[in-house]
């Protein structure tokens, strides 16, 4: 079991810091103060002597206090709708002890020399910044206190702060931070790793409901997203890539395209073989995006042959069947003696599960704006979740140094992992350089649907055995997935710690891989979003075979942990689920959902449960659903219980993230899939469409009428340092829904999406 860490301990809540943090203070004209932090690498301190700052340190400005007592805080991470532009400043404002009403938030541009870890992904923002951002605020408060002590000639220990005001009880003196800012700028700054932090009982901002920064601009349609950017002399671009991934252009009717209204440039891009970089295609540039789309309709491209054209969804499924009939390519975990245990089992359970490739389906399609400046730099306006990686890719594509790529971070209309990948940045920069004009590239919805970094599909064959006492004694999974040799395709992998590993005495996790030419990548709760459906669904089947309640079956398993055969490293320990934390959320989910009453539900209505540990967070979810005799599924209610540590920083965003994760998963379960024919994605858009054979090729989003009336969110607070929420809340929903469907209809769902499953009952 992981050791609880109190929130105030250690850098990033880890107890040990590998960097030493410092503060720099600058006076502002008009009597203000600018506080900037920087973290010096440990090796630099060692080289220069402990506590000696390196020459010309990297600065990272976070706080600006002006004489009018307005506090401006910089939000350093990309904002993709997860509320990070609100949450990170809350951490600073809490320890600074200011009035949130006087706080203004500014979005940082990408600058790795000033801001560490500017990334949005993996639910990492909270665990990465929980301590460092609070330290920035606490250090600022120390500077203000020192200034007041100097001006009033009193000990710092006699001073208190509240809502941006310093008070001295003995003399009755008070002063706002703004009036003390100029003096504070003359104080010696403290080392950030030495400043005291508040006891959580003193929090006045953390743990309170705060509105999303910029919510009025969002709801009134202000042009604040990446797709809204305009720059002088800006042209538009559309980029046509091969439907078969990485295929090259053999020929194109460019002369005709150049003659079309609004078109200023049309040219072939040779591209690279990097499926997450600049691929081959045809770029069309012009003065009006809609005119470009009309020109695009007249574009005729002959694409060179490519081996991926031999791949299809049917081929993938057939290959998985071949794998299941043969020995696995390799075993990634083997505990006990599965073969002997399965022979001694009273009941043997077997099932095959599969799930499809899916699209990220961000509301705002991929876009980017770029211009080449006279000084040789490439300036970009981007919604990337990984601007560091985006800058590196653009520099490589254009043959520039990374510091020649300037990136402005814009609010994104959804990310879900899609904007971890930066091929739109490479395309835009390359087109802008070739066309010699500033360019905004906007992907069409069809581009976005067919050229994603798709969540990969997968196939599982499970075999398990329970003994006469209803205990799970043997478990095997043969996972048919994608890759080459021992290398998995992106997000198509599985780890040796996948539950129920550690809780079944005789267990084998086997893997076989097939080659893949389709681009794949991380989607919200990567790997977990798919594996949870298969593993938790099959655990339900094991519980049924054992004649046990699904919740109690899981709890009993979690109480029977198999001792590790060798000591684990701290990193391995952190990556393992904590059985006691899982038991805690399962018991709470049982209580809040009224699980004991599930046996009294009317026919056609059922309740299901699942849990999952991912991205440091623990969630258990119960779903109540009703299935009509015609097979239509309606989710009546969802109860979600989360253990993400000791604090819920902003309950508004926390609840919204959980509710959004539930709805996101429901949409995937109901009808979302990407299929491939001759190496090409079949689906094109959200709206219905049909192929020549009459089959549907749409990618439906969840409709309002399909959403449950209530997604009830509960928190089980523990002593662990806070972690993220957006991803770990997603994986339990689909298997819990399938459990509810089974109780309602008696039918097991082992294939997604539900639109392909006959759920009619009588």
Image: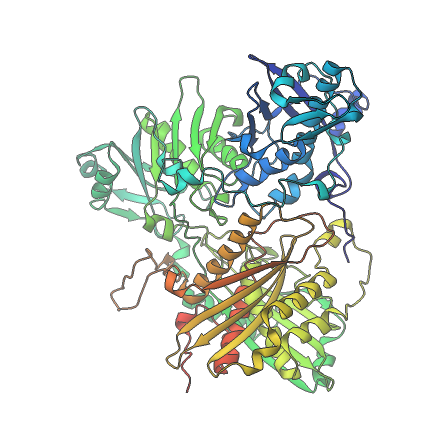
Q: Is residue 746 above or below residue 8?
A: below
Residue 104 coordinates in the image, percent (x, y):
52, 30
- For residue 152, side relative to residue 406 (left or right): right
The N terminus, quarter of image: bottom right
Q: Is residue 41 above or below residue 344?
A: above
Residue 317 coordinates in the image, percent (x, y):
46, 69
Q: Residue furthest top?
A: 29
The quarter holding residue 37 reads top right
The quarter holding residue 630 reads bottom left
The C terminus, quarter of image: bottom left
Residue 487 coordinates in the image, percent (x, y):
59, 54
On the question of residue 200 being in view, the answer is yes
Residue sitting nearer the eye, 169 or 721? 169
Residue 20 coordinates in the image, percent (x, y):
74, 29
- For residue 286, side relative to residue 215 (left or right): left
Instruction: Please state the total of marks drawn on the protein image.
Output: 0
- For residue 470, side relative to residue 612 (left or right): right
Residue sitting nearer the eye, 71 or 433? 71
Residue sitting nearer the eye, 385 or 29? 29
Residue at image location 52% in from the left, 43% down from the top: 83
On the question of residue 703 being in view, the answer is no
Q: Is residue 516 above or below residue 374?
A: below
Q: How is the image coloured?
A: rainbow
Residue sitting nearer the eye, 187 or 423? 187
């Amino acid at each position: 079991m992981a050791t609880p860490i109190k929130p105030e301990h250690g850098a990033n809540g880890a107890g040990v810091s590998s960097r030493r943090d410092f503060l720099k203070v600058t006076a502002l004209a008009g009597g203000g103060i600018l506080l900037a932090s920087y973290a010096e690498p440990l090796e630099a301190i060692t080289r220069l002597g402990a506590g000696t700052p390196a020459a010309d340190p990297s600065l990272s400005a976070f706080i600006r206090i002006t004489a009018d007592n307005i506090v401006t805080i910089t939000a350093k991470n990309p904002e993709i709708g997860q509320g990070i532009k609100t949450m990170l400043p809350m951490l600073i404002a809490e320890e600074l002890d200011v009035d949130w009403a006087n706080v203004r938030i500014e979005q940082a541009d990408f600058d790795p020399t000033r801001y560490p870890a500017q990334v949005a992904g993996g639910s990492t923002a909270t665990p990465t910044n929980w301590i460092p951002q609070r330290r920035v605020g606490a250090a600022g408060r120390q500077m203000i206190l020192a200034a007041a002590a100097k001006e009033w000639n009193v000990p710092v220990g006699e001073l208190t702060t509240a809502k941006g005001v310093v008070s001295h009880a003995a003399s009755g003196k008070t002063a706002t931070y703004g009036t003390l800012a100029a003096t504070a700028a003359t104080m010696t700054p403290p080392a950030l790793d030495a400043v005291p932090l508040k006891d959580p009982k003193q929090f006045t901002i953390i743990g309170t409901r705060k509105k999303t920064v910029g919510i009025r601009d969002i709801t009134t349609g202000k042009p604040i997203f990446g797709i809204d950017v305009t720059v002088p002399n800006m042209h538009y671009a559309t980029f046509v890539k091969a439907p078969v991934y990485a295929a090259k252009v053999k020929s194109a009717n460019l002369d005709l395209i150049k003659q079309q209204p609004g078109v200023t440039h049309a040219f072939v891009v040779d591209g690279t073989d990097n499926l997450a970089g600049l691929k081959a295609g045809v770029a069309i540039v012009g003065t009006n995006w809609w005119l470009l789309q009309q020109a695009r309709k007249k574009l005729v491209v002959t694409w060179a042959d490519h081996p991926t054209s031999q791949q299809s969804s049917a081929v993938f499924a057939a290959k998985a069947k071949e794998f299941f009939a043969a020995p696995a390519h390799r075993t990634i975990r083997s505990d006990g003696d599965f073969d002997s245990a399965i022979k001694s089992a009273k009941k043997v359970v077997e099932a095959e599960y599969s799930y499809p490739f899916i699209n990220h389906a961000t509301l705002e399609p991929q876009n980017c704006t770029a211009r080449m400046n006279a000084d040789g730099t490439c300036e970009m306006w981007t919604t990337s979740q990984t601007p560091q990686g985006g800058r590196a890719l653009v520099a490589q594509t254009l043959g520039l140094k990374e510091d020649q790529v300037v990136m402005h971070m814009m609010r994104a209309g959804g990310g879900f992992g899609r904007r971890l990948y930066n091929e739109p940045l490479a395309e835009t920069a390359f087109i802008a350089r070739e066309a010699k004009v500033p360019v905004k590239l906007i992907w069409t919805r069809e581009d976005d649907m067919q050229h994603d970094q798709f969540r990969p599909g997968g196939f599982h064959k499970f075999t398990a055995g329970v003994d006469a006492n209803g205990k799970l004694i043997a478990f095997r999974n043969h996972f048919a997935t994608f890759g080459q040799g021992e290398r998995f395709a992106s997000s198509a992998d599985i780890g040796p710690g996948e539950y129920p590993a550690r809780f079944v005495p005789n267990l084998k996790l086997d893997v076989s891989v097939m080659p893949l030419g389709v681009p794949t990548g991380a989607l919200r709760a990567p790997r977990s979003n798919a594996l949870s459906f298969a593993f938790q669904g099959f655990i339900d089947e094991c519980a049924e075979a054992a004649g046990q309640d699904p919740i109690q079956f899981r709890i009993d398993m979690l109480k029977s942990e198999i001792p590790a055969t060798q000591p684990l490293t701290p990193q391995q320990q952190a990556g393992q689920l904590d059985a006691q934390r899982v038991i805690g959320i399962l018991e709470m989910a049982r209580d809040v959902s009224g699980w004991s009453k599930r046996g009294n539900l009317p026919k056609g209505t059922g309740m299901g449960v699942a849990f999952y540990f991912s991205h440091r967070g623990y969630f258990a979810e119960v779903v109540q659903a009703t299935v009509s005799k015609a097979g239509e599924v309606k989710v009546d209610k969802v109860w979600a219980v989360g253990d993400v540590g000791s604090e819920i920083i902003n309950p508004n965003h926390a609840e919204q993230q959980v509710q959004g994760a539930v709805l996101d998963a429901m949409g995937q379960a109901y009808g979302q899939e990407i299929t491939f024919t001759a190496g090409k994605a079949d689906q094109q858009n959200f709206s219905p469409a049909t192929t020549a054979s009459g089959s549907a090729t749409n990618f439906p989003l969840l409709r309002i009428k399909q959403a449950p009336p209530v997604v009830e969110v509960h928190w089980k607070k523990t002593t662990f340092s806070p972690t993220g929420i957006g991803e770990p809340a997603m994986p339990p929903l689909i298997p819990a829904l399938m459990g509810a469907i089974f109780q309602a209809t008696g039918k097991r769902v082992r294939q997604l999406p539900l639109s392909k499953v006959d759920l009619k009952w009588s």
